[in-house]
Image (tube, rainbow, N blue to C red):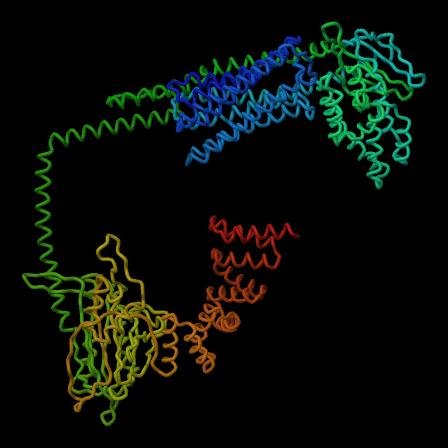
């Protein structure tokens, strides 16, 4: 079947149009392999010595076939190195020609022999055959391994993997049979196994090559060719397996029938079933019954006698009682015949080497040892038989001296074989060889099949014999069957298999195309014809729909597509013919729209201008304090022009003023200041700023008109102000919200009352250092429900202290205005640095902001400075200026100053100093949650894991929901070797964040360290499900495997 498969595949490749170089070599190589397989077909069919010349076919074609398949790989997909490939091919052809010539010359007059296990004739030329086998192996290595590996290294992408698949198919179909050939020559495996491996593995290799070629070839192939080719190879592969199973069953059937005939004829029944001879040996008187045995026509009597005695011993050994088996076996060995010496010494040596084995166990182990020994005896027998008679004395001795597996046979032969003498006598070399080989006869049980021959004149007679030991009669018999009868028994089955194969070939090659013509081939041809016509410009084509399957769906979709293209072309033609008219109409429509747009634009700019005029008086710096200075600047983003007048519009608002709170006889002066940023662009934001300006100015007017003194605390005034403004904005139902910071500063003491409604953090500038006044979000935007309760915060300003409040326009800078992709500033400390460089001057701060990047939003800055001295506190001054945004937070009491300084040290990279200052605060206020939180974080980052475990644990008692700190606690405990505590903390993170890969890796490693490998592997596998490229998880799995192997 491999012969048929190879010829078919060669035909597939040969009939491809416009073949490239690689395809030609693959086709030629497959053709040569097909003819190579025919050599074995010829040998199996012809039962005649002339069939030995099939080796000229197999040896003559295998080397060229291998080299051309190698050239296919070297030139696939393109012939990248034509000169190198051509030289390689020529050199390999020269070596092949000389090798084949050498083989033919060596076997021209060689004697022939019959391989019973392979059932074919062969040359009796093992030396040259072995040399050719080594050359074939070299060709396989070069063409099936070296060249593909070179191409895999050179090529890139998908082609590299295709070559790798070819390499695998070559290793399957080429390397294994070559190795099997060498082993079969030595006798390690039967010759039939080698031939079977050639057939099965060649077909498997052909199947893989065909699949790969048809799926990845760039050459034009037909769809039916792919169906027929793949189906053919698949069916033949299945048939080959079935044929092999059938033949094995037939072999077993022949053995059973032969044994039945043997039993009947030995009991005195009629001779049938192809029985050629019957030979009996009586053990008691050592006599032969040769009534139905002719020594001139039948096998060598001396060899049969040795086989009888070996079989008798084998059956007696394994019929011994298991009790005292060792003693009984030793006694039996002492009584064994002389030619059994090699087996005898091997068994005695086995008993010495295994003194502890007894009875049943000894019997079982001896059976295994004899099976192993039998293989090596068979190999040795083949090796010695292949040595020519004239060289047997020297080469035979030399081989036995190196054959360690049968060294006891050498011991048995030493007493009889000395130089070229046998028992001290000069004998013929052929007789010497025969005597030595008699020591290597098989040691097998009754009913084992023997292949025997008898040379009669210039031809050989072949027999199949079965030996039976009759324990009751104490005799051994052999019944020999004609080998030709065996072939006649197998012939009908083989003939039927050939007929079935022929039917399969006809059906697949000739009938398959007919089966698919109506449902597959014809519809595909119709579709292809339609595509060709469309390519030629014919859009009137319509593909007929024959069947409603996938191809029918494609045809219907194709017709719809062509129809759409046809309609689109007609519309395009219509557009082309009426283009001028359509352009004129479109131009008129566009002009009308532009005019309408201009009218709307003027109306909109008017609305903008009116809103701008309304907003300007509301952004009023009304502070008259000489003790506290306030300045602000507004730079609204929206710039426009209305009737020649330029203006701006935005959502930022700044307002200042003065209040007197207390009773007429005892009151204090306060400076009010606020900065806000209404949400929304253009009119929406401006509307929010307008509402805020109106409401705040109204409250100030109401609170300070006519030198009014309010008997109310600063906290209460800010609270009522917030509630009034918030209620106004909430009435808009969320469509208008505003962020803002409000300040009320006592002139005499500098005590400051404030709240921040989700506005950018206020900057506190003192002694040349800028920090954030706020520490966290304290209140949601005005106009929204807030989950934080309203609270007025306080701090105290000293002389020279400056507060700078600003909208988020100071932070939202485009750092790369000249590039296509905007890069928005995300550095929260940038504005702090700007304030420090500008020394608190908002004019300089504004210029520095412009240098940093491009403003992307409204910009407003409010500057409050405490400590301006004056003789008349009633006088006021008005300063309008410009300013920018801010960032974080800090307090100005002694405690808050230290905490703020520690935070700033951390931001500046001075972690050690920050930890020292926080540790001092922690010693004074050990229950302050802010100090604990920051100290825990910094201790962990500074790798002070003892301190980190203490402070992290204390913080997590107050706030157990912070997963990040549980993770830090786990790492710190792990570093200290506290694996149980580390696992507990890591499991906390797992419960809250099951997809946190960093924590999963840590937890897996912790379980590994605790030798809980199952749990560790589960978690590592979970990491790889989330992140297949996670190297840490892979490393942990490797460590787990190493740990398991060590245990």
Foreground: 807 or 1045?
1045
The N terminus - image quarter: top right
Left or right: 999 as drawn, with respect to 109: left
Instruction: Give residue 311's quadrant in the image.
Output: top right
Q: Is residue 608 above or below residue 459?
A: below
Q: Is residue 642 above or below residue 505?
A: below
Left or right: 121 as drawn, with respect to 745: right
Whether residue 447 is visible, yes or no, is: no
The picture places residue 593, in percent across and down from the top left corner, at 11, 47
The picture places residue 104, in percent across and down from the top left corner, at 59, 13
The residue most toward the top is 457
The residue most toward the left is 644
The picture places residue 110, in percent across and down from the top left corner, at 66, 12
Q: Residue at x 18, y 89 (%)?
A: 870
The picture places residue 869, in percent across and down from the top left corner, at 20, 88
Instruction: Give residue 833's quadrant in the image.
Output: bottom left
Q: How many circles with numbers are drawn on the protein?
A: 0
Foreground: 40 or 965?
40
Foreground: 331 or 792?
331
Q: Is residue 323 above or below residue 815?
A: above
């Amino acid at each position: 079947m491999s012969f048929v498969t190879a010829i078919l595949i060669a035909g597939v490749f040969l009939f491809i149009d416009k073949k490239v170089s690689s395809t030609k070599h693959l086709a030629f190589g497959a053709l040569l392999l097909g003819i190579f397989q025919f050599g074995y077909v010829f040998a199996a069919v012809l039962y005649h010595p002339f069939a030995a010349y099939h080796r000229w076919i197999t040896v003559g074609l295998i080397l060229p076939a291998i080299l051309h398949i190698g050239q296919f790989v070297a030139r696939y997909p393109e012939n990248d190195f034509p000169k190198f490939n051509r030289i390689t091919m020529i050199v390999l052809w020269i070596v092949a020609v000389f090798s084949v010539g050498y083989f033919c010359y060596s076997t021209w007059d060689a004697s022939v022999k019959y391989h019973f296990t392979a059932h074919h004739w062969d040359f009796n030329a093992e030396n040259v055959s072995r040399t050719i086998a080594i050359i074939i192996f070299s060709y396989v290595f070069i063409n099936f391994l070296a060249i593909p590996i070179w191409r895999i290294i050179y090529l890139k992408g998908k082609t590299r993997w295709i070559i790798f698949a070819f390499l695998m198919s070559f290793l399957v179909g080429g390397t294994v049979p070559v190795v099997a050939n060498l082993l079969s020559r030595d006798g390690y495996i039967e010759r039939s196994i080698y031939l079977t491996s050639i057939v099965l593995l060649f077909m498997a290799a052909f199947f893989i090559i065909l699949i790969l070629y048809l799926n990845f070839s760039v050459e034009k192939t037909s769809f039916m060719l792919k169906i027929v080719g793949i189906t053919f190879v698949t069916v033949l592969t299945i048939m080959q397996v079935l044929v092999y199973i059938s033949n094995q069953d037939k072999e077993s059937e022949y053995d059973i029938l032969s044994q039945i005939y043997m039993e009947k004829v030995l009991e005195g029944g009629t001779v049938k079933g192809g029985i050629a001879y019957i030979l009996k040996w009586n053990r008691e008187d050592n006599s032969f019954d040769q009534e139905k045995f002719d020594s001139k026509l039948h096998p060598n009597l001396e060899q049969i006698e040795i086989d009888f005695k070996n079989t008798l011993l084998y059956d007696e050994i394994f019929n011994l009682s298991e009790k005292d088996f060792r003693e009984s076996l030793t006694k039996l060995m002492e009584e064994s015949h002389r030619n059994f010496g090699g087996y005898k010494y091997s068994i005695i040596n086995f008993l010495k080497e295994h003194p502890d084995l007894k009875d049943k166990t000894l019997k079982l182990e001896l059976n295994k040892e004899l099976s192993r020994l039998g293989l090596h005896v068979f190999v040795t027998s083949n090796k010695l038989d292949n040595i020519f008679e004239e060289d047997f004395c020297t080469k035979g001795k030399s081989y036995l001296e190196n054959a360690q597996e049968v060294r006891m046979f050498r011991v048995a032969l030493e007493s009889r074989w000395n130089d070229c003498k046998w028992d001290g006598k000069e004998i013929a070399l052929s007789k010497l060889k025969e005597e030595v080989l008699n020591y290597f006869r098989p040691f097998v049980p009754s009913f084992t099949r023997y292949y025997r021959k008898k040379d009669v004149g210039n031809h050989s007679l072949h027999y199949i014999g079965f030996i039976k030991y009759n324990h009751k009669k104490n005799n051994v018999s052999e019944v020999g069957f004609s080998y030709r009868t065996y072939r006649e028994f197998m012939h009908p089955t083989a003939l039927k298999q050939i007929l079935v194969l022929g039917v399969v070939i006809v059906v697949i090659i000739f009938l398959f195309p007919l089966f698919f013509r109506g449902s597959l081939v014809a519809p595909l041809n119709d579709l292809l014809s339609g595509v060709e016509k469309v390519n030629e410009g014919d859009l009137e084509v319509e593909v007929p729909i024959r069947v409603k399957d996938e191809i029918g769906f494609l045809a219907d979709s194709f017709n719809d597509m062509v129809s759409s293209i046809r309609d689109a072309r007609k519309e395009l033609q219509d557009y082309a013919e009426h283009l001028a008219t359509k352009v004129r109409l479109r131009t008129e429509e566009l002009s009308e729209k532009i005019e309408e747009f201009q009218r709307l634009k003027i109306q909109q700019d008017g609305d903008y201008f009116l809103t701008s005029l309304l907003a300007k008086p509301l952004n009023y710096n009304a502070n008259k304090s000489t003790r506290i200075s306030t300045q602000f600047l507004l730079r609204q983003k929206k710039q426009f022009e209305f009737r020649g007048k330029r203006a701006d519009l935005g959502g930022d608002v700044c307002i200042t003023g003065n209040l007197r709170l207390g009773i007429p006889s005892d009151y204090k002066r306060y400076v009010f200041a606020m900065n806000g940023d209404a949400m929304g662009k253009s009119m929406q934001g401006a509307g929010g700023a307008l509402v805020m300006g109106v409401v705040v100015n109204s409250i100030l007017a109401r609170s300070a008109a006519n030198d009014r003194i309010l008997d109310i605390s600063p906290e209460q005034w800010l609270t009522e102000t917030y509630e009034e403004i918030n209620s106004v904005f909430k009435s808009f139902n969320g469509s208008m919200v505003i962020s803002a910071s409000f300040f009320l500063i006592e002139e005499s003491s500098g005590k400051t009352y404030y709240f921040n409604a989700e506005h950018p953090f206020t900057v506190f500038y003192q002694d040349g250092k800028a920090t954030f006044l706020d520490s966290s979000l304290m209140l949601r935007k005005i106009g929204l429900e807030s989950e934080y309760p309203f609270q007025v915060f306080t701090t105290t300003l000293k002389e020279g202290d400056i507060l700078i409040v600003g909208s988020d326009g100071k932070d939202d800078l485009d750092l790369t205005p000249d590039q296509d992709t905007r890069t928005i500033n995300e550095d929260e400390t940038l504005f702090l640095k700007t304030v420090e460089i500008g020394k608190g001057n908002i004019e300089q701060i504004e210029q520095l902001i412009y240098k940093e990047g491009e403003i992307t939003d409204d910009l407003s800055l409010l500057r409050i400075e405490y400590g301006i001295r004056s003789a008349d506190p009633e006088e006021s001054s008005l300063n309008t200026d410009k300013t920018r945004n801010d960032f974080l937070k800090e307090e100005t009491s002694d405690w808050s100053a230290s905490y703020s300084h520690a935070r700033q040290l951390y931001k500046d990279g001075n972690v050690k100093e920050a930890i020292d200052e926080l540790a001092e605060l922690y010693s004074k206020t050990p229950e302050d949650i802010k100090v604990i939180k920051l100290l825990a974080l910094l201790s962990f980052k500074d790798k002070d894991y003892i301190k980190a475990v203490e402070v992290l644990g204390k913080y997590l008692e107050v706030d157990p929901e912070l997963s990040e700190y549980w993770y830090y606690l786990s790492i710190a405990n792990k570093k200290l070797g506290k694996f149980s505590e580390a696992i507990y903390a890591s499991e906390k993170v797992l419960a809250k964040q099951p997809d946190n890969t960093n924590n999963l890796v840590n937890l897996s490693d912790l379980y590994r360290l605790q030798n809980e490998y199952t749990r560790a592997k589960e978690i590592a596998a979970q990491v790889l499900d989330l992140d297949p490229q996670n190297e840490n998880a892979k490393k942990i799995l490797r460590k787990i495997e190493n740990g398991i192997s060590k245990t």
